[in-house]
Amino acid sequence: MLSPKRTKYRKLQRGILKGTKATRCNTIDFGDFALVSTDLAFISARQIEAARIAMTRKIKRGGKVWIRIFPDVPHTSKAIGVRMGKGKGAVDGWFATVKPGTVLFEMAGVSKELAEEAMTLANSKLPIHTKFVAKREAE
């Protein structure tokens, strides 16, 4: 699964989700087709990996897939049965913050129909609403 090799501060506060549209990572740069978010959400590293596996299995490793988001925000939790207090819990996982308009995945080397089916499978693994976009439509 995706996680940072090293971070300056290991335990961060989650923060709040705000913002209307993505100003970065909002154009199709590498592939011909893309999956674009329409919601504001946190996406965990497990969900990103599940979506990637679903897409690559559908295209039978025929095309190329780019992951455009990276889970760099830590999620901490205390163990079950531990009382409150005594500091913050250990890092449990990582998540990425996604705004509307962010390109999540890109794909090239496959037909439009196959890419759309693969992206639909990936969409079912994610906790947000997304839309399928072709590069010609986006321009």
Image: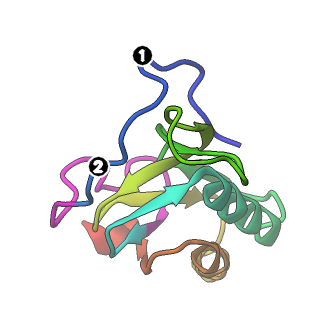
Q: Residue at x 70, y 66 (%)?
A: 55
Q: Residue at x 68, y 58 (%)?
A: 52
Residue 117's mark?
none
Q: Does residue 46 sit above or below 119 in this rendering?
A: above
Mark 1 closeness class: few <14, some 14–19, many ≥20 residues within 10 Å: few
Q: Tell me the SS state at disc 2.
A: loop
The magenta span reads 18-35
Would residue 48 appear left or right of 55 to someone viewing this image? left
**Image spot of residue 133 (x, y percent):** 41, 74
Residue 68 visible in this rendered orientation of the protein: no
**Image spot of residue 122 (x, y percent):** 63, 72
Question: Residue 24 magenta-drawn?
Answer: yes
Q: CA distance from mark 2 to mark 1?
A: 17 Å
Q: Residue at x 15, y 67 (%)?
A: 20
Looking at numbered disc 1 in the image, what kind of residue is underneath it?
Lys
Q: Tell me the SS state at disc 1.
A: loop
Residue 15's mark?
2
**Image spot of residue 93 (x, y percent):** 61, 44
Quadrant in which residue 113 is drawn: bottom right
Would residue 122 appear left or right of 24 to someone viewing this image? right
* Quadrant of the drawing holding the C terminus: bottom left
Which residue is under mark 1? 8
Question: Residue 100 magenta-drawn?
Answer: no
State how the image is colored: rainbow
Mark 2 closeness class: few <14, some 14–19, many ≥20 residues within 10 Å: few
